[in-house]
Amino acid sequence: MKASVRWLRTLCPGLDASPGDLAARFTAAGLEVEGLHVYGEASAECVVARVVSQRPHPGKGGLHLVTVDRGGGTLLEVVCGAPNVPPAGGLVVLAPLGARLPAKGVTLERRTIAGIASEGMLCSEAELGLDEGGAGILVLAPGSGDPGTRLADACPETHDTILEINLTPNRPDALGHVGLAREAAVLFRLPWSMPAPGSPVRVAKEAEPDIDALASVRILDFERCPSYGAAAVVDVGIGPSPAWLRYRLASLGVRPISNVVDVTNLLLLEYGHPMHAFDLDRLRASDGAGARPIVVRRATDGEAMTTLDGAPHVLVGDDLVIADGAGPVALAGVMGGASSEITAGTKRVLLECAYFEPRGVRRASRRHALHTDSSHRFERGVDPGDSRDVLARAVRLLTELAGGTAVRGDILVARSKAEPAVVTLRAKRLDALLGVHVPWEEATDTLTRLGFAIRTRSAEEVAVVVPGHRPDVSREVDLIEEVARVRGMEAIPVALPRVRPSREDAPRERVTQRARAAAVELGLSEAITYSFVSRASLEKIGAPAPAVILQNPLSLAQEVMRTSLLPGLLEAVGLARRHGERDARLFTVGSVFLGHGGQSGLPEERLSFAAVLAGTRVPYLGKPEAIDVWDGKGLAEGFARRMVGRAAIGVERFAHGELPPYLHPRGAVRVVVDGLAVGALGPLHPDVVDRFDLGSTAVVVEVDLALLERQEHKAPRYAPIARFPASIRDLALVVHDDIPAGDVVDAVRSAAGALATEVTLFDRFVGGAVPEAHRSLAFRVVYRADDRTLTDAEVDAQHAKAVSEVGKRFGATLRA
């Protein structure tokens, strides 16, 4: 929310606090001011000047030498190339020498242009930082000010301080300057009252049609639209708004369009209550004549309309629309339709000010991807009781700024008026909750000044009527919070509460801490990922369908609870790579939420570990090498060993049909601990790499910590240093590509017998004399006995048995 300090001072007379003090007080009271900037900073240094004469530049075409009176009889000659310099007597804005123009980042210095010195500059709105503006300099209206008057004094709206306020969703009253002015008056203890909307400048005569003759309103869904108000102004002249209105809107980030549209935007910023203007003559009557009908109803499935931004929309039955006699003309609370928008030819305007149920507006806004200033306010809740004031204020401004004539009467259709909420506040509860005594009169006075009404009062409690502009207040604790924040949080004593921390020795916490420690020891960095993810991210890796779906997610990126840890990690890697960081070694530990299981019908929450390796590794005294599946295998084995000790840890190929869809078929394996598959690893499938925009492949590791923890933790066992020497034999076997190297290792170890203490694969070779679809695998076999030195004959016999067994089992041949 952007707030104008100048506007707040107008609405709250006596508010003379500096912008910094106002920002600090707002922030302390819960309206966090994130930033503060000056709008039109140059207007404090630029002055009004009167054109005396102008003549063409003698040395350069397209330029003029303009003589201006800058006040006090001082004449200056300025070189100017603008096409709209007014004739003698016209008022312009002069930036004298030494003036700063922050919007352009320059300070005016004497310059010689084509041989003639310019003693200043005639400024445009863009150069003054007021608006993007069009071509040419800013020409002021006659009588705007005497020559030499600062522009900030001649046109006060050209200089303002803007507060950037980060509002929490529970404070819709602060989405308008009236609400902020009420807040400022309370915080600085100033008198305040609601601004009067004022009376129309021109009103239609008795003989002319009243509002009922021009329009009718029917509400067919009072649940979604409890009230709808309308008023009309005729004989309007569409044109630019006056300077003060254009600059006020521009300072708050709203683009001026035309006087009618600008008035509706101004009132949105003033009251925080959105309104809409229809071209009355473009509203269609069912019979083609008579009063134009306005019907508030649900859309029919498949009904179409085009919104003001030119985008077509197909509506559904849950959409609430404003319709005329032929079809929808607005998506209620979100955006108006193009068929009835205000145009240059508009003469009669129908004004709408309604209350729409917040949840319905929120659903429609998200469904059609239209987040507007209007929907932002309706979603949080507007004051349902200020519709007549807003309409009256709009009518007053249109008769004043657009030359319109107010049609007699207004329309306000509403269901039976709901009783306001009444909340009881107890003095003892107030003191007990805040931990400090608050004078009872101070508390009730604070609530009264905030707009709450006191229905009944005693020395110990009051019954408080909640005003329409505070839909967030419904409980006693809410009233206590209002008293506390206005009084100042610094007035509440600081005392640490007694808390019971979670037990770090709980089984789940123990496993989590050990997993994190193990991953860090292996050189990984932890990535904190959300438990909420999007459906799309799960679908990208073919993860199980989500079992927990949020009914009201913060965003579409957090609409379901994850069934895999990988999407969060891969999105982190993709983001890092888009910022130029190619290498990543990340892990995360957390729960995944799988399909409903057990008699409880609740999702199964399983503790898991996932890691991703991407980029390159840098070997000692070597060149960088690309991460591959062997890095993932080493990581998985190292992690499992740190978690369960001296278990039998290895990898094995997936059975047919069990391969996870996110892994590459070549290189994907299961992680096995003591014969139990506890996870998977491998390079990502190329399709997954493309879906996450990773640029190049990555290796991932997933481990089910719940399964891993079931394995018995075996402490490392000491083995004495061998007393007798080993005998080493190398073995190169040619086998078919389909035969896993691990199966060959197991066969060699089994056939070689107990004397073979180590069997290690140390080389793989293809090509050359090796037949097609085959590969040469080289193994190192270490033979050793614990009680003697082996003879060559013993070793040769065992080695020959191993070669023979592998040849029979796999059709392997010795490589020459």
Image (cartoon, rainbow, N blue to C red):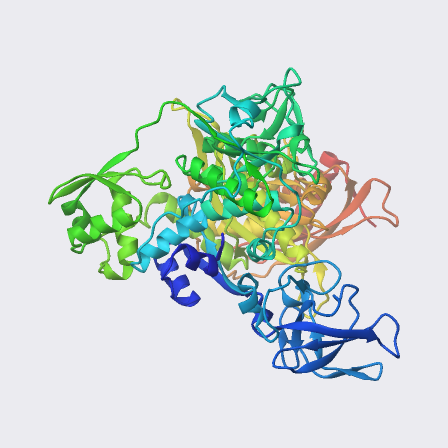
Say left or right for 190 vs 88: left
Left or right of residue 244, residue 511 in this image: left
**Residue 565 visible, this angle:** no
At 41% from the left and 54% from the top, the residue drawn is 11
Query: Seen in the image, is 706 located left or right of residue 506?
Result: right
Determine whether 771 is above or below 361 in the image: below
Percent position of residue 732, x then y = 76, 49
Task: State the residue lying farthest toward the left.
Answer: 459
Above-or-below relation of 67 to 692: below
Tally of numbered tags: 0
Which of 102 and 15 lies nearest the eye of the viewer? 15
Inspect this view and state whether residue 736 appears: yes
x then y, percent, for residue 598: 41, 24
Residue in the image at 49% along x and 62% along y: 35
Reply above or below: 157 against 300: below
**Front-most of 83 and 433?**
83
Q: Residue at x 41, y 52 (%)?
A: 180
Give 742 or 129, whichever is nearer the viewer.
129
Q: Position of residue 41 (x, y in %)?
A: 57, 69
Work out which residue is located at the far top of the displayed protein and give it: 287
Q: Position of residue 752 (x, y in %)?
A: 64, 45
Q: Is residue 706 above or below residue 38?
A: above
Give 257 or 673, whichever is nearer the viewer: 257
